[in-house]
Image: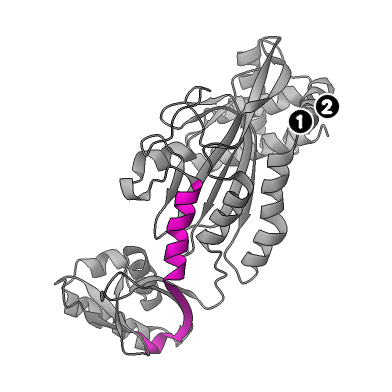
Amino acid sequence: MTDSTILTQASRQWATRPDDERFTSLTALHDHVTAIRNNSRASTVASRDLHAVPSDTDSRGLQIVGPSGHAANVSHWAFGQLAQRAGAPAGYLRDLPAPLAADCVNYGLRFTRDVEDLGVLLTKQDGNAPATLRAVTGASYGRIWNSTIAGALVDRFGDGVSGSFRVPGEFGKAVDVTKENTTLYASDRDMFVFLADEERRIEVPNRRDGKAGSLARGFFVWNSEVGSATFGIGMFLFDFVCQNRIVWGAQGYKEVKVRHTAGAPHRWIEEVAPAIHAFAESSAAPMQTLLLAAQQKKVDDLDAFLRTRFTNGQANGIKAAHLADEGRPMETLWDVATGVTAYARGIKHQDARVDIEREGGKILAMAA
């Protein structure tokens, strides 16, 4: 079997997160996001009841006054949401003097758009500092709290450093978890978790060049309680994770996403939480059976099979990628799945690559 694709989602997090958004255990991350939730209050207000004023402490900053008459600071993300509601480019407003920017926001909220109900999220700060406005969404926004997800992960996987699923090691070898190599991240905007089971590896016959090998299980979980991202989980098999937190040799990537609509909290309970549990509890035997079945199941009409799932260009590229890596044409579902992931390696755009990888996962599942 060929080397499969790489996953860079965790590496991007590793490369961009500041120190205060990195956590060395799931429990520490959970404590952090729980404290934020405990200090937060969500409510629905009419857009006409929000009023922007220049900040008392920042000559270029704004505060938002709500129906209570109390002024709140505005996070960078929430300001962008508020500017969108006001019908003005956030980047343009940020360059204006505060009094003029406030006038633009207020004019937009009152005259440019019809009155609408908005969902606002306020978080209290330490001491007597003003609260911070962290989100301005539609009234039907279905918030899934970071603390809810982190709590479920702690209940199932403990601290994330000592159980079966934990922060992945480097090149398959366990390491002490530090802020430099962690894969547990959270901020006032979002969270991202990557856990892997690298000890109970899945043995795969004919893994590469006719030789047996093994794969580990891993998953990503991400969420934003302020609307900067959907909630989702990506599950996959892989060879190893390097020091830069790139996942190498990924196979069978499957993804479940939940948009933050009114029913989102219920979908988390009904769909995603059981998926995480089932993936973590699945024994190696069923997965080995699936992979072996895929290696044995022939594809009768390869061209027709590919062209019902991919464009002509993609189908030809998949066949060529498999032939280049394996030195023989595709014959089985296993060949097709590995050809798909080999082809995906050459796709530069991340979203397009993940879409192709998902199709490869679906093809592998057909052997069940």
Q: Disc 2 marks which amino acid?
A: Asp
Placement of 266 over or under 243, stated as above or below: below
**Residue shown at 67% from the left, 66% from the top:** 266
Please name whichever residue, 287 or 60, is drawn nearer the observer in this view of the structure.
287
Q: Which residues are magenta?
A: 26-50
Please name whichever residue, 50 or 153, is drawn nearer the observer in this view of the structure.
153
- Name the side, left or right, on which 229 lies relative to 368: left
Where disc 1 sits, the SS reads: helix
Place of residue 138 in the rendered image (x, y in percent of width and height, measured from the top left)? 50, 75
Q: Which residue is mark 1?
A: 287
- Name the side, left or right, on which 264 lies relative to 117: right
Q: Quadrant of residue 257?
A: bottom right
**Residue shown at 36% from the left, 36% from the top:** 180
- Residue 118 shows in this picture: no
Q: Disc 1 marks which amino acid?
A: Met
Q: Which residue is mark 2?
A: 301
